[in-house]
Amino acid sequence: MKTQATPLAASHFADNPNQSETLAHCLAAICAGWQRDATYGELCCALGTAMMVSCSRSARSVDRWNIFGRHAFVEEASRELGVELRPLHPPQAAPSPPAPDEFDLHWRDSYVPLVRLSLARGEPVLAWMGWPPPHDSQWGVITAIDIDGVARGLTPGCGSEPVRLVGPAVQAYCASAAEQIRRPNQDRLESMLRRFGSIVRNELQVDFGVMTGVAALAALREETNPEIISPVLRRMAADRAAAIPTLRALATGANTSFQSLLDHVAHAMDRQCECVARIEQLSAEELVGSLIELESRIAALLP
């Protein structure tokens, strides 16, 4: 017999080239299932990914940029939205992707039974990796275990019908509804800006295996392949352009000093987007150098 959770709206998993953060799409679908409304921009700001350029030097080249570390703040951000996430294992226990062959057995024997129990309670499971190529490095939501023990679910870009995982998820969270924390906008904004500060100053825990912010951009400046550089920078600009309206909306009603801080941060983010818009006119070294200067300015402003 197949075990499955409460169905999720497939519309949250539609492919959108300007909204690349698959973790945010998955969390939006889970939140909507419990009437916890949050926009893509709000979720990216809450997660901190709106400000995250991440690089993992130890990863295979296809996964090096903007794949690792996206879930650094997912548990606390989800809790604020009224969703409790319980990791099947802590981040430091996750294997470095691609997972070794023996982890496939560990996933099947140790983790699939826990996923099955969560689904039996109607609770979906947020999962990173294991999805069918070319989406294998994405986040998705496991919604069922088939009779042969293989997990099935939804991930952005794979259509409206659930797909079977082709490998183990290297990180997974069982999701359940919790009381939503109602906080003043200024408190929410302050939490977001603290996360942004940790990211742009490269202060994430070493367990996540990434460089972020100024350090990641410095690593990007060493790249020579424009097919790597251009997508990273275009995504950075799209993420920040989407974040600015969310931040400004939350700043409404904040005290004067806080609004002034946000104005300076948003101005630097706007300038970064303007720099990336000139990607065809500037050399990669000049462009990334300008972005590093602005990123350093943002890092100095943020709490």
Image (tube, helix red, strand yellow):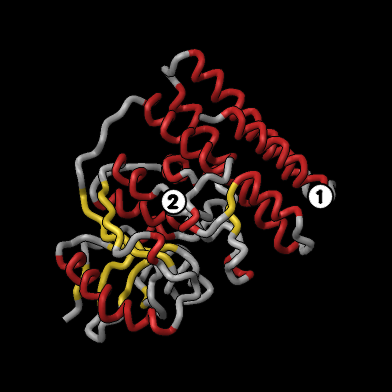
Q: Nearer the viewer, residue 231 or 29?
A: 231
On the image, the x and y values in percent for residue 40 come to 44, 46
Numbered label tally: 2
In the figure, 223 relative to 178: above or below?
A: below
- Mark 1, residue position: 285
Look at the image and tell me whether residue 159 can be seen.
no
Q: Nearer the viewer, residue 57 or 32?
A: 57
In the image: residue 124, left or right of residue 45:
left
Q: Nearer the viewer, residue 74 or 1?
A: 74
Q: Which quarter of the rendered picture does the N terminus lie within?
A: bottom left
**Residue 253 visible in the shown view:** yes
Give the SS element for disc 1.
helix
Which residue is the site of mark 2? 72
x and y percent of residue 276 in the render? 72, 45
Q: Residue at x 15, y 63 (%)?
A: 121
Q: Could you tell me the amino acid type at mark 2?
A: Ala
The residue under label 1 is which amino acid type? Answer: Glu
